[in-house]
Amino acid sequence: MELIQEKQGGVLVLEPVGRLDAGSSQDFQQQVVRLVETGERRVVVDLRKTDEMSAAGLRVLLMLSKKLESMGGGLVLCSMSDQARKAFDVAGFIHMVSIAIEPSRSEAVARLSADEAVAKVSDLAADLLAKKDVSPTGEE
């Protein structure tokens, strides 16, 4: 399996090419864990060139989703091939987990970008609410 990587804004797009199965999932997992450890927090996995997906591949995506979520990031899947969608459906994976799925790469990137903007506004609001006496001029 080949893994194509591309940055779109602040979002890392990963595109596994070929089979994401028992034989390749460990390598895929090592690569994505390394990327998260270097600071990636918003990841799109584009599955349009994934020919086959097994339970091992699904497990890696679930692990990645949980890891990113625990670090304040997120995972969005997109452009599922028929084979990938079939694997998700057979496993009941789509209904068991809260991984976002978008029809296209642009929609997946936009979703993570919007999530980041909401998080920044929430953090700013929390900071403002934590301050006690803030005058209209910005002086405390």
Image (cartoon, helix red, strand yellow):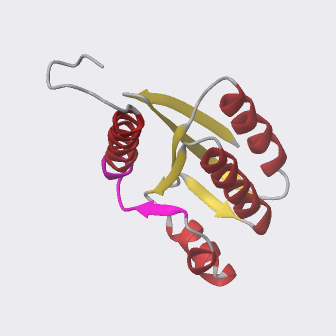
In which quarter of the view is residue 41 placed? top right
Callout count:
0
Position of the N terminus, as image quadrant, is top right
Tell me if residue 61 comes above or below residue 109 in the rendering.
below
State yes or no: residue 80 in magenta.
no
Extreme residue in the left direction:
136
Instruction: Identify the residue at image location x=62%, y=26%.
Output: 39
Left or right placement of residue 65 versus residue 85 in this view: right
State yes or no: residue 107 in magenta.
yes
Left or right placement of residue 85 versus residue 135 in this view: right
Q: Is residue 48 visible?
A: no
Position of the C terminus, as image quadrant, is top left
Q: Report the span colored magenta.
A: 99-108
Where's residue 11, x and y in %? 45, 34
Instruction: Identify the residue at image location x=49%, y=53%.
Output: 76
Left or right placement of residue 70 versus residue 76 in this view: right
Along the line of sight, which residue is nearer the eye, 85 or 12?
A: 12
Where's residue 138, x and y in %? 22, 19
Tell me if residue 82 comes above or below residue 132 in the rendering.
below
